[in-house]
Image (cartoon, rainbow, N blue to C red):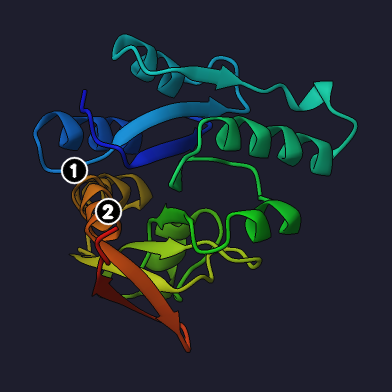
């Protein structure tokens, strides 16, 4: 993969296409980072197989083995801290993170969402966009805060909504852009120190150590 010292922990629940886009960007030299671990709450998540094929460490945490959400999130925290990750990336992770976890990694958790936030947070967003009659949709990379899909925006890509679109065709076109901007947003964080003020994200050059 890469010898970069910038370590990413990726949380997944499903197919892992954004995980694959991150892996590809690293292999292509477009992203100067290393995936330290891929964690999932789903044992059969195809994303875990994608990581294993690249000899990336994977961890499955069974939510049923924990007394509650807080205990699960604490186990997740331990796995990430043990590997000293610099950034936590959500890539199709379908559990809502608790307040304690988010505060522990404040400013170091990012997510990609298939709409132009703040429009259409939550689930079924492509259908919502079509039902609402919007002419453009897209995707958003954002920092994660304690509300759902509400954190400060890092990067967005715009996709036109065609009259012939259904939720599936729109999702497919948006996904192409997700695969482009997610690695790009991570690289922006790798290269520069993100600064957040009044919800606006700016980047400053890293200070040499």
Neighbours of disc 1 within 10 Å: few (<14), some (14-19), many (20+): many
Q: Nearer the viewer, residue 134 or 180?
A: 180
**What distance separates the C-alpha of mark 1 from that of mark 2?**
8 Å
Give coordinates of residue 114: x percent, y percent: 38, 56
Give the residue at x 45% y 36%. 10
Image quarter of the C terminus: bottom left
Instruction: Confirm or deny contact between disc 1 and disc 2 (CB under 8 A).
Output: yes
Neighbours of disc 2 within 10 Å: few (<14), some (14-19), many (20+): some
Q: Nearer the viewer, residue 186 or 171?
A: 186
Q: Secondary structure at mark 2?
A: helix
Residue ID for mark 1 = 31
- Mark on residue 94? none
How many tags in the picture? Answer: 2
Give the residue at x 58% y 55%. 105
Residue 31, above or below 46: below
Image quarter of the N terminus: top left
Residue ID for mark 2 = 190
Residue 16, visible in the rendered structure: no
Give the residue at x 26% y 55%. 165
In the rendered image, the residue lying farthest to the bottom is 198
In the rendered image, the residue lying farthest to the right is 67
Give coordinates of residue 96: x percent, y percent: 66, 50
Q: Is residue 29 left or right of residue 58?
A: left
Residue 199, above or below 82: below
Q: Is residue 32 left or right of residue 13?
A: left
User: For residue 47, what is the image quadrant?
Assistant: top left
């Amino acid at each position: 993969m890469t010898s970069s010292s910038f370590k990413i922990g990726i949380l997944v629940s499903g197919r892992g296409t954004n995980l694959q886009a991150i892996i590809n960007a690293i292999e292509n030299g477009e992203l100067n980072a290393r995936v330290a671990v891929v964690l999932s709450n789903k044992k059969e998540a195809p994303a875990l197989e994608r990581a294993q094929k690249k000899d990336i460490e994977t961890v499955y945490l069974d939510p049923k083995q924990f007394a509650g959400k807080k205990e699960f999130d604490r186990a997740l925290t331990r796995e990430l801290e043990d590997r000293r990750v610099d950034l936590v990336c959500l890539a199709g992770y379908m559990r809502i993170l608790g307040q304690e976890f988010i505060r522990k990694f404040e400013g170091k958790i990012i997510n990609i969402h298939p709409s132009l936030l703040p429009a259409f947070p939550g689930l079924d967003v492509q259908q919502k966009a079509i039902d609402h009659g919007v002419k453009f949709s897209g995707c958003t990379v954002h920092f994660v805060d304690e509300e759902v899909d509400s954190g400060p925006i890092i990067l967005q890509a715009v996709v036109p909504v065609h009259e012939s679109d259904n939720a599936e065709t729109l999702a497919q076109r948006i996904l192409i852009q997700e695969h482009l901007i997610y690695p790009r947003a991570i690289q922006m964080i790798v290269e520069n120190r993100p600064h957040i003020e009044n919800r606006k994200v700016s980047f400053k050059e890293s200070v040499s150590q």
